Amino acid sequence: MKEAISARNQHSQSGSNFLQGNIAVIAVSSAVRGFGGGLISAYVSLYFVELGGSPLALGLMTALASVIGSVMFVLGGIVADYYGRRRVMIVSAFYSAFFPLLYAVIQDWRLFAALSVVAAVGSISNPAVHALVIDSLSPDKRTTGIASLQVISSLPLTVAPIMGGLLIQNYGLLNGFRLACIYTAAISFISAFIILLFLKETLRREIPTKSNFSNRGRLKDVIEFARPLPTSLKGLMLSYALVAFANGVVGPYYILYASSIIGLTPIEWAPIASLQSLGVALKIPGGWFSDKFGKRKIMILSVLTCAPCTILFTLSRSFFQALTVALLLIVTGIYYAPAYEALQADLTPRKMRGRIAALWRLSSGLATAPGMLVGGFLFQAVDPALPFYLFTVAEVMAAFFLIKFVREPEKKEI
């Protein structure tokens, strides 16, 4: 009963203006954290290789981090649904803020890889974030609300890669990256304090005096309850897993291809990364179109138009060609994620959202891991262009599952 009362109050606040309360807190905190992460995220692959790691080792590192993150998604989903969203988000925010400081002092690629894998434990809060955002948005404006939140959170990424690139240009790749890590850590702590001070819990539930979190039955529930789920929800998650695999195949290797094949420098890559982030603003009109004309249709269109763009990237041989293709990737692919989250919410009852988010992240994380390994192997041992061809194949398969199995519900879950 308390949970239902909380839901009605929250939606009455968010119906006319969703950018307030928890949504505003998450938007500000994510924007601050995104700026800090943006200083280094575009250059992690180059830094790892400069320390002595190979593209295949990079793929192994990112794959292991993805697997660890997937396990944390399962635990995080249970925590979010049984013990609340807020506390796990606070602990995770402070935990993750320490790792950039550690990155700034290490000088061996093996230790860097180990720390990156351990840092993936911080993803335990992702299902809680997803559930809290959905709890705080009215059903008729979910896609627009999610898209707006993602846009606001991503705006600092339009300038952060350029600042990171300038640090690398002025101090060299190693020292510049380490200096950027120190700034990232400081900014991440600010983001964590914003959550600590202002975020409100949305799950009103009595907590038992004696925790039974260790009950293995609940862990099994995360997987077992997937069996009776609607076909549309299963098809939706399978489609997303294929998209996650596709992005894993190419994600860490864009900048390596740009550097080794196209011949771009880090400072030339910086505006490409920044303009890609600026393109995120298209999520807002995309969200509006999804709410008005159908989320499934927008997702299919997005996947099919995005699929050939990576092949065009392999044909690029100049800064302007690479920039053009990078912008095409954003313009075509940017609408998928908010439409997916909103459609998943439409299909999922409130009491199951944390666990469904965990199952979604588990499946996508386990799909990303082999993608990164396969991408690293193909890039290093076969042909650097092959991961980008494989991306196209996986995206077309994702579109097939959307067309074949996914239907929008007649009545949306609140």
Image: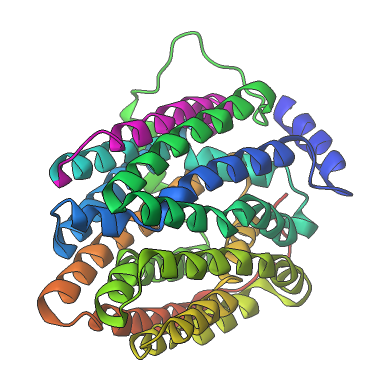
Question: Where residue 318 appears, x then y in whole percent?
Answer: 40, 86
Most extreme residue toward the front is: 170
* Residue 143 is at least partly visible in this image: yes
Q: Residue at x 54, y 82 (%)?
A: 328
Q: Residue at x 22, y 42 (%)?
A: 112
Name the quadrant of the N terminus.
top right
Question: Where residue 322 appears, x then y in whole percent?
Answer: 43, 81
Q: Which residues are magenta?
A: 80-109
Q: Residue at x 35, y 47 (%)?
A: 176
* Residue 354 is at least partly visible in this image: no
Vertical placement of residue 100 versus 333, above or below: above
Q: How many marks?
A: 0
- Name which quarter of the figure residue 72 lies in: top left
- Name which quarter of the figure residue 331 lies in: bottom right
Left or right of 389, for residue 269: right
Left or right of 136, for residue 303: left
Vertical placement of residue 74 versus 335, above or below: above
Q: Residue at x 79, y 30 (%)?
A: 5
Question: Where residue 211 appears, x then y in whole percent?
Answer: 43, 15
Which secondary structure type mostly characterizes the magenta part of the structure? helix
